[in-house]
């Protein structure tokens, strides 16, 4: 996979930019606040249909302009493609893929990217929501069906939460919860199963990367943690064995809801009335949802489901989140991002585009060398921003561009 060209018009601080990119490493050098990150943001937006820096599309439009335009040409399995995005200040955006208008949810998976920014160095010790987002973004790019299931789950979750608040305020009967639980349990089981499969593969890949970066001194293990699953829970013993891997421990954690692609409403949609519950994991979710009716009504939110789960990480058997040193946590975050590249290659057949936003200054010399050596060896198209050319080993390491006040010139 390769981005071949990018055109921006009234996007952030770019009045009109047309840029051709090389298939190798593209280095954008310049001082802070000159527009380097805006280029990465545009590519990321074309990949996921959203910015990693803002929730408002209007923030992407150049000051005082009525609309912004983003056009990106790329190849996938040597087949040329093009994404055109119009961002009006008023009204709805327009997404076009290869000449055909598409919905936002149909964009995900067309162009695969992995973004590594300074904020990702806090992926390990930060809130569980960040780790869930990491998993969801990764899996969604490899599986559009998973992304669609996320949207379904989040819609059901929002509607159930709205109902819980109405019950708490005595505007609805608790009996109305009964038909919602099986629907939410079914969707939750699908999401959890896919996350477990991804974590199992990521565990192997991330451990391999950790060993390379640490000189074979450290083993990194990953575990998918289901919120509310107790050690003595015997509802689905066979399922429990797929949740844990031998190098990790189970803990409980909470977090914030999944992102949504739907609008919040104050009305309750009537769910299907089917009460069939088939898989052990689905049965467990259904039972837990039923058991927590009183608690959920009191809080006005659903207290069990994949929107509460977490990803646990350990180095040499020690919880990396709680007890890892800063160096170990940064190595773990880097290993996780490199594992994400390998995961997407294994799922799609080719490497995604790697976007590195000013992370060279955050990594020490040994980690920088390990990262750059990996990128060169695997021939991964990389778009990296930096303030200093000294972070790179030699003058001919990649194609260099200088960025100053929204102007890009090739060195």
Image (cartoon, helix red, strand yellow):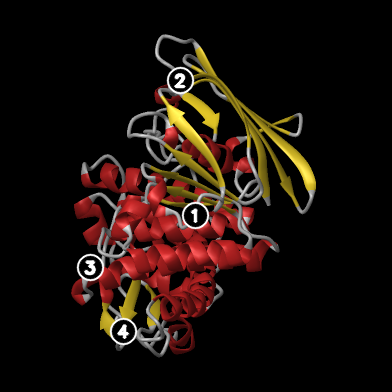
User: At numbered mark 2, what does the secondary structure look like: helix, strand or loop?
Assistant: loop
Label 4, label 1: how many angstroms apart (C-alpha)? Answer: 44 Å
Label 3, label 4: how far apart the Cα atoms are:
21 Å
Say whether residue 248 is left or right of residue 11. left
Residue hosting label 4? 249
Marks 3 and 1, Cα distance to the nearest angstrom?
29 Å
Residue wearing tag 1 = 394
- Classify mark 3: residues with Cα within 10 Å, few (<14), some (14-19) or many (20+): some
Along the viewing direction, whichever of 71 and 275 lies nearer the viewer: 71
| Residue 411 seen from this side | yes
* x 29%, y 61%: residue: 293
**Closer-to-camera residue (221/410):** 410
- Give the SS element for disc 1: loop
Residue at screen point 45% across, 31% down: 403
Residue 227 is situated, as x and y percent measured from the top left of the image, at 32, 70
Q: Which of marks 4 and 2 is in front?
A: 2
Which one is in front in this view, the residue at disc 2 or the one at disc 1?
1
Q: How crowded is mark 1: few (under 14 residues within 10 Å), some or many (20 or more)?
A: few
Q: Is disc 4 in contact with disc 2, using a CB cutoff of under 8 Å?
A: no
* Residue tagged 2: 61
Local secondary structure at mark 4: loop
Q: Can you give x and y, in whole percent of width and height, for residue 117 in the image?
A: 38, 50
Please tell me which of labels 3 and 2 falls first in the chain. 2
């Amino acid at each position: 996979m390769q981005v071949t060209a990018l055109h921006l018009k009234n996007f952030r601080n770019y009045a009109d930019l047309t840029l051709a990119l090389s298939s190798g490493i593209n280095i954008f050098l310049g001082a802070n606040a000159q527009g380097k990150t805006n280029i990465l943001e545009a590519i990321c937006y074309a990949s996921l249909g959203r910015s990693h820096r803002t929730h408002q599309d209007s923030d992407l439009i150049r000051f005082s302009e009525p609309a912004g335009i983003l056009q990106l040409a790329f190849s996938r399995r040597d087949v040329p493609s093009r994404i055109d995005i119009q961002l009006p200040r008023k009204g709805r955006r327009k997404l076009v893929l290869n000449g055909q208008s598409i919905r936002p949810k149909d964009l995900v998976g067309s162009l695969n990217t992995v973004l590594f920014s300074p904020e990702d160095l806090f992926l390990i010790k930060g809130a569980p929501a960040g780790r869930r987002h990491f998993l969801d973004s990764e899996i969604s790019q490899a599986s559009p069906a998973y992304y669609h299931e996320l949207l379904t789950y989040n819609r059901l979750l929002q509607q159930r939460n709205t109902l819980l608040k109405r019950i708490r305020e005595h505007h609805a009967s608790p009996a109305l919860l009964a038909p919602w639980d099986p629907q939410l349990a079914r969707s939750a089981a699908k999401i959890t199963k896919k996350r477990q499969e991804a974590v199992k593969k990521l565990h192997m890949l991330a451990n391999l990367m950790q060993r390379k970066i640490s000189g074979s001194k450290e083993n990194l293990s990953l575990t998918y943690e289901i919120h509310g699953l107790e050690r003595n829970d015997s509802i689905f013993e066979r399922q429990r064995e797929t949740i844990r891997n031998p190098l990790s421990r189970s803990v409980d954690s909470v977090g914030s809801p999944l992102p949504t692609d739907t609008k919040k409403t104050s009305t309750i949609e009537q769910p299907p009335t089917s009460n069939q519950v088939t898989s052990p994991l689905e049965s467990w979710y259904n039972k837990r949802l039923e058991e927590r009716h009183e608690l959920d009504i009191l809080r006005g939110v659903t207290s069990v489901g994949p929107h509460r789960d977490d990803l646990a990480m350990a180095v040499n058997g020690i919880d990396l989140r709680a007890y890892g040193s800063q160096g170990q946590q940064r190595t773990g975050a880097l290993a996780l991002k490199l594992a994400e590249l390998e995961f997407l290659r294994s799922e799609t057949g080719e490497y995604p585009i790697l976007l590195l936003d000013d992370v060279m200054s955050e990594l020490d010399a040994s980690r920088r060398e390990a990262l750059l050596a990996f990128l060169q060896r695997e021939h991964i198209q990389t778009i990296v921003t930096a303030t200093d050319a000294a972070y790179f080993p030699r003058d001919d390491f990649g194609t260099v561009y200088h960025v100053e006040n929204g102007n890009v010139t090739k060195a």
